[in-house]
Amino acid sequence: MEHILLSASLAFLITFFAIPIVIQVAKDKKLFDEPDERKVHKTVIPTLGGLGIFAGFIIATLMCVPSGITSELQYFAAATTVIFFLGLKDDILILSASKKFIGQLVAAGIVIRFGGVQLTNMHGFLGIYEIPHIASVVLTIFTIIVITNSFNLIDGVDGLAGSLGVLTTLVFGIYFFYAGQLTYAVMALALTGSIVAFLIYNFSPAKIFMGDTGSLLLGLVNSILVIKFINVAGNPAANKFALEASPAIGFAILMIPLFDTLRVFTLRILDRRSPFSPDRTHIHHFLLDLGFNHRMVTLTCVTANIGFIVLAYFIRGLGATTAIGILLISAFTFIGVIYYSRPKNKSVSNIPPVNNNNIIKPRKILSLAPESVEAD
């Protein structure tokens, strides 16, 4: 227990004291996300909050995981470092979607090949149990890429991605603690501590954004945690805290960012557009159209995600296939109610996005020039 508490506390303190320094450096060097007609914020705001999140997370994790109990931690650190520099470069110079995708593939490859994190069993979902090796690798890569980008794409209003990240990592951390998976418990709760500290500066009105540096890190760590959760919770022979329908519960823990991303990607592909093309079809856009402020959007999404987790837990006895089906129906109902409650004059087809952290940014949002700030 002392390792868990120390990791969360240390991560919180490091991030809490690092963020003001990051803000000051960003102001001195003119590293801002500038407002324009597409943005919901009206003043220039630094986007390098991920620096503080990464610092708190990586230092606390490396210091608080007891030595000798795991061999995969070094590879997780390597993968998160790859994602950190990928996000940092994108926040400063802007990367193309293809380069970001390649970087995410490299991180996923490290996690799978060296970290041993891989989906090898569907635990009865669609009647599937053991998965062939090649199919397992492909499915794991897909899972990591989608979850990594889901937090990047949901980061559209102040406090939303961070609050969802606190919920997911806290749930995973508590479960892994009781399941005896100390490495993953420390990782999860170290990230929880870092995000809580970051949110102090990110809640509306935000003083700083996490940027791609923070959202991609949040997504990658959650992808590692959910894959491990499915494997551990679905193995009653090796875990006294096993849970039926572990894929459904894992899906529910990440429900809002994951379902929203899969839904939006599907709509864009059906519309013969790139899945990464910008629009206003995310759930937070619909809630903003209803007149919700940032805090209300965040509270609504987090509350809904908690509801999905509770629902999945109580219907787990129905099996993974039925449970996931019920979750999907519930999610579509939730989205449908919000969508059809919007004012009728709102259109989502060609309105540019307010997402300050979208994966496609055909503009340079940050200026390194000391004397002038480049407009978007």
Image (tube, helix red, strand yellow):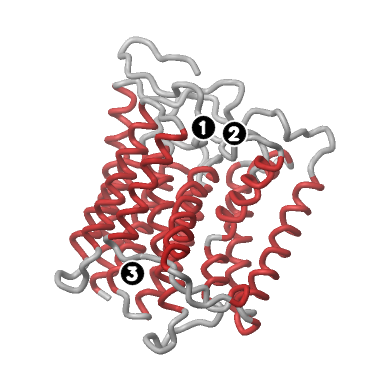
Say left or right for 224 vs 13: right
SS class, disc 1 = loop
At horizontal 52% and vertical 40% (from top left) the residue drawn is 204
- Please name the residue shown 46% across and 68% down the image: 171
Q: Amino acid at mark 1?
A: Ile
Asked if disc 2 and disc 1 are in contact, CB closer than 8 Å, the reply is yes
SS class of the residue under badge 3? helix
Q: Earlier in the sequence, mark 2 or mark 1?
A: 2
Total labels: the figure holds: 3
Q: Amino acid at mark 3?
A: Ala
C-alpha span from label 3 to label 1 = 33 Å
Q: Earlier in the sequence, mark 2 or mark 3?
A: 3
Q: Is residue 286 left or right of residue 316?
A: right
Q: Secondary structure at mark 2?
A: loop
For label 2, the residue is 277
Q: Position of residue 342 (x, y in %)?
A: 79, 42
- Residue 231 placement, left or right of 183: right
**Closer to the camera: disc 3 or disc 1?**
1
Q: Residue at x 41, y 77 (%)?
A: 232
Amino acid identity at mark 2: Ser
Question: On the rendered image, what quadrant is the N terminus found in?
Answer: bottom left
Position in image of residue 197 (x %, y %): 36, 50
Q: Earlier in the sequence, mark 3 or mark 1?
A: 3
Which residue bears the numbered disc 3? Answer: 185
Q: Is residue 333 above or below residue 16?
A: below
> Looking at the picture, does residue 83 appear above or below residue 88?
below
